Image: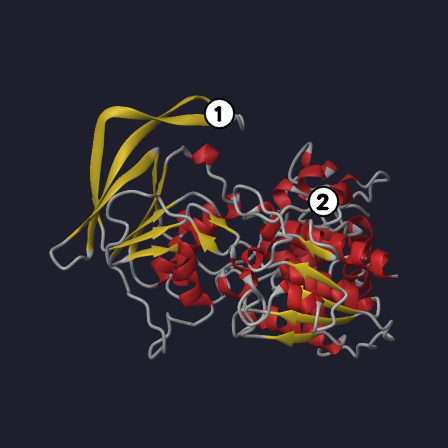
Amino acid sequence: MANMSLTKNPMPAQEPDVRNKNFAEVTLGYTKEQALDEAQRCLNCKNKPCVAGCPVSVRIPEFIAKAAEGDFAGAYDIITSTNSLPAVCGRVCPQETQCEAKCVRGIKGEPVGIGRIERFVADTHNAVGETPVRKPKSNGHKVAVVGSGPAGLTAAGDLAKRGFDVTVFEAFHVAGGVLSYGIPEFRLPKAIVAREVEGLRSLGVKIETNAVVGKAITVDELMGDAGFEAVFIGSGAGLPQFLKIPGEAALGVYSANEFLTRINLMKAYKEGSATPIMRPKKAVVVGGGNVAMDAARCAKRLGADVSIVYRRGKDELPARHEEVEHAEEEGVIFNLLSNPTEILADENGRVKSVKIQRMELGEPDEKGRRRPVPIPGAIEEIETDCVIIAVGTSPNPLIASTTDNLETNRHGCIVADDAGLTSHKSVYAGGDAVTGAATVILAMGAGKTAAAAIAAQLG
């Protein structure tokens, strides 16, 4: 019998004043009883609008129907027929703007907790232990994948399942891309990422770490002497953008990329870390997206009083509502309608404060968002010893600069068609390297599309 409750089963979580002092996962996941109850809220709509909202076309009503029956193994098989990273997606996908935004139950109440059920199904599967994987028969074709983030992992997995000999080239010493260096442990435990990577290895995917394509080997060399017949570039957007204001060179100013990489990949928050990071007393994070929330919440866990400075209002924050809510609960202060104009340093060159210009919202810009306008004379100064800049990233130009055949746009993004094909013969690209910084699931969708196009091209 359907559960007609208008509200989702709440997600169990650590208490705010406990979790803001540790890096353990914040949300604890559904119990079996909660997962069953939530799954029974699904109406199994004939037209399946939720599927249309999923970039990798997960067969949502089908897997939820299995979950509602208590057949979690069957639900897992349905999910993984189109999505190779369910434990990741169940945690970090913006379901509220994708599949859940299309859910019919959301018309008169809250949508079904699709992501929460997906996470439970994946975690239940992973708790059982390793499932034997049958390595597909080789089709004799070699494909290189540049980058082991969500786009690269998805492309590699889909190609390996089709029998391709796949090698992934990762610049860092650990595979996972942004899943490893960008998203904090308290949102996405790294053991989950490592398990997904090992799953690819079991399919026969070879992963070469510390391999910087563009330096150690070029795209042209991959297609030449290395013998690869096609290349997929999923190298992400790891080049940080800055504010271009006075004082950005002061000690104690970080890009969010560096700050998060030190914490997530190099475990700088641990005592005795080989790559320690300062433990600020007061931190200012500039930006309003998910990366800004991650940086702010990490700084809070290092013991700082943290404020987020963002030039628009709360309704315009681009971060997920859940991440904003968690940051507020953990004690992060939101200094909205504020824009930094200068970073001030002391006599030793260390950050001591930030000047901010107070703003108000004016007419809408070309994207329909109300444009922030300075309030004349409304300048304030915030005392701080750390500034973290989280205003966006762009693709690293290294890969494109080492070949004459790879077209990029004015933002440094690789130009690719709907199938992911670039201007370079047999070279495909997708994810943040093409779109600029976006979401994990959109990058996965691009990897999936490109893998299908490569398979079609090489037969």
Q: Is residue 177 above or below residue 61?
A: below
Left-right relation of 231 to 243? right
Q: Amino acid at mark 1?
A: Asp
**Pointer 2 residue:** 417
Q: Amino acid at mark 2?
A: Asp
Quadrant in which the C terminus appears: bottom right
Left-right relation of 393 to 349? right
Residue 333 lies in quadrant? top left
Residue ID at (32%, 29%): 359
Which residue is nearer to you in this view: 410 or 311?
410
Expressed as whole percent of the image width and height from the top left, the position of residue 44 reads 82, 44
How was the colour assigned to the protein in this rendering? secondary structure
Under tag 1, what secondary structure?
loop
Answer few, some or many: residues within 10 Å of disc 2's Cα (few below 14, many 20 plus, some between 14 and 19). few
Which residue is nearer to you in this view: 84 or 119?
84
Which residue is nearer to you in this view: 74 or 280?
280
Left-right relation of 245 to 73? left
Of callouts 1 and 2, which one flags the residue occurring earlier in the amino acid sequence?
A: 1
Can residue 425 be spotted in the picture? yes
Under tag 2, what secondary structure?
loop
Kindly give the residue lying farthest to the top in the view shown. 363
Residue ID at (59%, 47%): 408
**Pointer 1 residue:** 365
Residue 457 lies in quadrant? bottom right
Expressed as whole percent of the image width and height from the top left, the position of residue 65 reads 82, 53
Answer few, some or many: residues within 10 Å of disc 1's Cα (few below 14, many 20 plus, some between 14 and 19). few
Expressed as whole percent of the image width and height from the top left, the position of residue 266 reads 43, 72
Left-right relation of 350 to 44? left
Q: Is residue 258 above or below residue 107?
A: below
Residue 253 lies in quadrant? bottom left
